[in-house]
Image (tube, grey):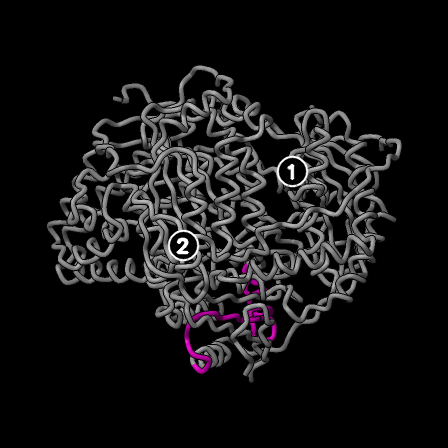
Amino acid sequence: MHQFADLAQRPLQLTLTNGLRVRLVRLPHSAQAAALVRVHAGSHDAPRTYPGLAHFLEHLLFLGSRDYPVAQSLMPFIQACGGQLNASTRERHTDFFFQLPAGQLEEGLRRLLDMLAYPLLDPDAQLREREVLHAEFLARAKDRETLSDAALARAIDSTHPASGFHAGNRETLPVDEPDFQQALHGYHQRFYRTGQMELLLAGPQSEAVLQRLAEQADISLIADAAVRRSPPVLHARTEGWSRLQLEQTQPRLLLAFIVDGLDEHALPALDYLATWIASEAPNGLPQRLQAAGLCQALSLRVPYWFAGQGVLAIEASLTSKGLAQRTTVVDALTDWLRFFVEPSCWQACWDEYRLIAERSLHGAEPLKLLRHWVEPLAWAADSNEVGIGDALRTLIKRMTDIGPVVLTVDTAPCGSVTSDGFPLRMASEPPLTALRRDWHWQIPQANPWLKTAVSDGKAANPVAALRWLGQTEESGKAALMLRWRFAELPVSALWHGLSHALQGCVWAARQAGVELRFENMGHSWTLSLRGFAEAVPPILGDIAYLLAEPPEASLAQCARLAEQHRSLGQDEMLLRQLLNRLPRLVAGMHQSAEPARSVNREQLHAAWRDARWDGLAVGFSSQTSTALLASVGALPGQPALGKDWLEAPPTESHWHQVGDGAVTSDTAFILFCSLADRGLEGEAAWRVLGRLLEGEFFRRIRSELQLGYAVLSRFCQFADQPGMLFAVQSPTASATEILRQIEAFLDTVALQLAERSTEDLTGIAHATADQQADASADLNGHAERAWQAVLAGHECDRIGQVIRAMRELRPADLMAALHDLRGGAGRLIVTNAPAPSGWGR
């Protein structure tokens, strides 16, 4: 077997007796484990007669299997463990993956393997799930990225599957027809076999245990040889420019390159290229175009890739000036590509890329590691630098020789075009040309946070406002969380200006292995830095100055960004937009109807003078603690002298409509019920109740009623308010109907709860206590729960006390908690729909 020690070493791939390919990653100090199965078949391998069949099968596999009916299947099991799972169907592969407490890996893997090999494919379940898939189709029919890719697909020769529609909907999935059932079962029998599958496992288990689990998987799956597939040649059938009309969208320019015949190193070369196209480093491509006032951000997406052929799309988020000068943007992008392959640029950028990749793997969660290593020739310490460099030069030469298919996405009116799948409003445009100019490109500046070295600096005095938990763990990760409270709330637009100032820092910190978040919690602002411990002090020192003295350009953006935040955009899922607003709304900071005001530096200075901060540091060694205290000393505001005030649980209910009331085809709906009883027993009972409700709510709303395609329920905390969350996005139901169904669901749960035995409920309470203990076993979980306790006004060890209280719960405690939840006091409803008449506030 291979060595497990260095996470930058590529894990060896082994082929087991029945043909299953496996890679094993041992993480001795992790409290979590993960599994990923890649099936080498996707939407392009399904019969073209039935678009969406592969994606439909992915959904059906979660609906029960031979040894595990729906109630005991993978999804409720992972939910009960407090883990995460998902699946993804791409053009030529389908991935299934989960992460959960390490002790549950074997049980989770058993369920995953059984559903892949022996799904029930129940006809009634198919009818219900088809409606879910159709709801997804309706949602994706408004998604900017999906429609942009569909528009680009029209430029591909019709003989290639990349030109077709593969998402699936009610019309393309005739589940009642025998021919469809034959195709569905045939697809599963052909591709869901060992020869077409890879398994990756990561966790703290011993080498022998991981090997045993892999061998068990090889036996559990159905053995068969690999299926060889050769796609047709990929080439464009049209050239030139076109336009796509979307409502309420930031204008974008896409340069799509259709390439074929590249070697195996082209895929890692693409990852390298994507890193630098999106890089926000000084002198980098995005920074230069931002300085010219042409665009706000850049990215490289790969809508299609298989066997050395693909569609590559450079996407620019345009300003109004950039929209008017699209030819200049096209010239800049193509000219930069030529510069990027110059020898002087290659070596400097490759050395930086290697540091970024190393830091990304350092301390990564198990699932993130598996999603990295499943990709062919993903970066590793042994990556072929010469091969990748040659592939990059070949790739860019192809791109610049053939030229791009250019697509503008904005609100300009276009006519409808004939389409087999998603509705498109498009128009052709004559190609535009611009005078070539010399851009004088430079090599992007190196990220200083990638080469951190904690100095033996002068010891700083401890600060009482900063609580400390634990020494650094073996992974070298740590977490710092800070909160500022204000005697008088500053103008809300100030936070938007500071967020703008920190944009480049968020990107650079992520490269250095640290997740940086700056959040508006209504009555407070919070800053968190989590990741590579040695990078946190220098990052904090640099951003402390930016918070105190942001650039004038960022302050000038305050009013515009605050006004933009008021409306709902189409570039992000509706429900996610509402969830992002929830902390401020839970804190009672409802948006004013007044327009956002401009702000100035004097207002910011006044806000910081009145600010008092406190924080929590978790996992720092004595050496990094000294450096951290020095950086903390530069923070704006003053350390809090004692416990700050606490917000009482709300007693009134509010219905808050987000957006301007414009008619949309989807309803996004959130119900948040604040926890009224803040004692240990009250919180323990609501946490156990949250586990009871989570899986049942998903099954009732999504699977049985097909009310929405995005459905979630859980006990959680926003700002300093813990409570129960119910969230639904539906293409068919109104906000009033969703609320009615939530209340009906809780009524049903009350009847069911009364009938459950004491032993059953005690077992659930103990299992929830175990889950909470598992979730607090690693640094991220420990830090998050301790910080939530601090935000809510408790001591850092609050979760340990709650866990002990869970083990003492009685059925009567759960019934009382459900009674309080159904009582309706302290409810906050956030939706894009107006309140019904008679709703009491």
Tell me: 212 left or right of 252: left
Question: What is the x, y in percent for residue 516?
Answer: 48, 45
Residue depicted at 47% across the width and 20% down the height: 602
The residue type indicated by label 1 comes to Ala
Disc 1 to disc 2, C-alpha distance: 36 Å
Task: Kindly identify which residue carries mark 2.
Answer: 625
Q: Give the quarter of the figure containing the C terminus.
A: top left
What span is colored magenta in the figure?
181-208
Q: Which residue of the protein is positioned furthest toward the top in this rendering?
A: 594
Give the image location of residue 29, x and y in percent.
41, 69
Mark 1 burial class by Cα count in 10 Å: few <14, some 14-19, many 20+: many
**Looking at the image, residue 168 lies above or below residue 761:** above
Is residue 676 toward the left or the right of residue 137 in the image? left
Snapshot quadrant of residue 669: top left
Provide the secondary structure element on which disc 2 rests: helix
Q: What residue sits right under mark 1 in the picture? A: 297
Where is residue 387? Give x, y as percent.
77, 66
